[in-house]
């Protein structure tokens, strides 16, 4: 089992980072949206699932250019240390670091 996780560690790490940032943006955006709506119109708060369907959520997501730079940097750094099984660019998973130069 540990080898299976290590063989796919790059994909797993990137998936967890994406899921965490998406969830953080959704929850933080929901709180901000509810606060703004309460001040402007006194509207009742909406759930995170409802906020997911608003144009505000998707507009904020598409405008978040800083995350693109973070994503590229993450790919570069993680691809140095982690390996992905069957990737032509990856070092063999079971070879020791001393043999691969890492």
Image (tube, rainbow, N blue to C red):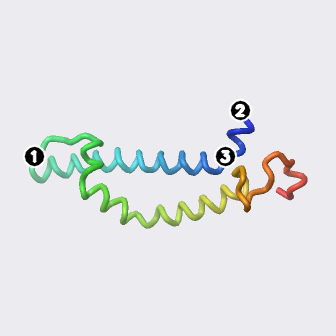
Marks 1/2 in contact by CB < 8 Å: the verdict is no
- On the rendered structure, is 69 left or right of 89? left
| Residue drawn where x is 47% and y is 45% of the image | 20
Q: Could you tell me residue 86's position as x and y percent?
A: 72, 53
Which part of the image, by quadrant, shows the N terminus?
top right
Q: Earlier in the sequence, mark 1 or mark 3?
A: 3
Residue under numbered circle 1: 42
Residue sticking out furthest to the left: 41
Compared with 62, 33 (above or below) is: above
Element marked by disc 1 = loop
Q: Could you tell me residue 98's position as x and y percent?
A: 89, 52
Marks 2/3 in contact by CB < 8 Å: the verdict is no
Q: Could you tell me residue 41's position as x and y percent?
A: 9, 51
Residue sticking out furthest to the top: 1
Compared with 14, 6 (above or below) is: above
Element marked by disc 3 = helix
Element marked by disc 2 = loop
Number of the front mark, 2 or 3? 2
Number of the front mark, 1 or 3? 3
Alpha carbon separation for disc pair 1 and 2: 52 Å
Mark 1 nearby-residue class (10 Å; few <14, some 14–19, many ≥20) = few
Alpha carbon separation for disc pair 1 and 3: 47 Å
Q: Earlier in the sequence, mark 1 or mark 2?
A: 2
Residue under numbered circle 2: 1
Alpha carbon separation for disc pair 2 and 3: 12 Å
Q: Earlier in the sequence, mark 2 or mark 3?
A: 2
Residue under numbered circle 3: 9
Compared with 5, 36 (above or below) is: below
- On the rendered structure, is 77 left or right of 36? right
């Amino acid at each position: 089992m540990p080898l299976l996780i290590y063989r796919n560690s790059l994909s797993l790490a990137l998936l967890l980072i994406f899921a965490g940032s998406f969830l953080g943006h959704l929850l933080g955006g929901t709180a901000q949206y509810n606060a703004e709506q309460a001040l402007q119109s006194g509207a009742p708060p909406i759930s995170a699932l409802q906020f997911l369907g608003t144009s505000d959520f998707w507009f904020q997501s598409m405008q978040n250019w800083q995350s693109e730079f973070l994503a590229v940097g993450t790919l570069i750094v993680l691809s140095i240390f982690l390996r992905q099984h069957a990737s032509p660019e990856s070092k063999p998973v079971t070879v020791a670091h001393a043999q691969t130069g890492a």
